[in-house]
Image: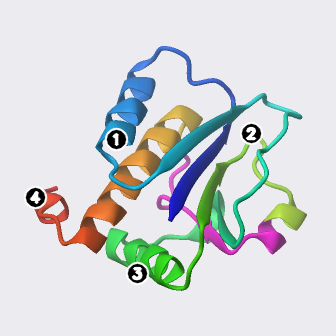
């Protein structure tokens, strides 16, 4: 299954960008990173069937194992793409939330957008290592 991270705003050259790149290189699953401007921009056509996850303050606070279970189930059900969408500063619309397959939060705290992107990449790497039975999760 193809993992697609779609984020509003440019990460540029930053410590967070280095973390994103580190986890992108470590991922054994196909992954694509798409950056969009703060408003507008064109989201690439999906590979169907797909699931959409919005990173959202109103989302579920899942453990890494719970997220791995969900992603693994999607993979086993034949999903071709799992999209993980980070919105602009004002978040996602109610319609976007209603259409998403999963709303995911990283706890109750509000995280800076660039940190959330790096944290997402680490969690995607962790999810894939959990599904592969790799020791990274136990050591992390």
What whole-number distance in Å separates the C-alpha atoms at marks 3 and 1?
20 Å
**Mark 3 packing: few (<14 Cα in 10 Å), some, or many (20+)?**
some
| Marker disc for residue 2 | none
Q: Residue 96: x, y in percent?
A: 83, 62
What whole-number distance in Å separates the C-alpha atoms at marks 2 and 4?
33 Å
What whole-number distance in Å separates the C-alpha atoms at marks 1 and 2?
22 Å
Which residue is disc 2 drawn over?
A: 88
| Marker disc for residue 69 | 3
Q: Is residue 40 above or below residue 136?
A: above
Q: N-terminal of the two: label 3 or label 4?
A: 3
In the figure, residue 43 lies in which quadrant?
Answer: top right
Q: Secondary structure at mark 4?
A: helix
What whole-number distance in Å separates the C-alpha atoms at marks 3 and 2?
28 Å
| Marker disc for residue 23 | 1
Which residue is disc 4 drawn over?
A: 139
What whole-number distance in Å separates the C-alpha atoms at marks 3 and 4?
19 Å
Specify the segment rendered in magenta. Answer: 97-110
Looking at the image, do the residues carrying marks 3 and 1 touch, with CB atoms under 8 Å apart?
no
Q: Residue 124: x, y in percent?
A: 41, 56
């Amino acid at each position: 299954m193809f993992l697609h991270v779609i984020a509003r705003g440019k990460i540029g050259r930053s410590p967070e960008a280095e973390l994103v790149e580190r986890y992108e290189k470590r991922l054994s699953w196909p992954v694509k990173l798409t950056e969009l401007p703060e408003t507008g921009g064109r989201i690439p056509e999906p590979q169907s069937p797909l699931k959409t996850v919005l990173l959202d303050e109103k989302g579920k606070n899942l453990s890494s194992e719970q997220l791995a279970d969900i992603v693994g189930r999607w993979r086993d059900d034949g999903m071709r793409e799992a999209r993980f969408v980070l919105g602009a500063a004002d978040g996602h619309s109610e319609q976007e939330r209603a259409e998403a397959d999963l709303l995911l939060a990283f706890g109750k705290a509000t995280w800076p957008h660039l940190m959330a992107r790096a944290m997402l990449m680490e969690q995607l790497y962790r999810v894939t290592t959990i599904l592969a039975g790799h020791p990274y999760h136990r050591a992390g």
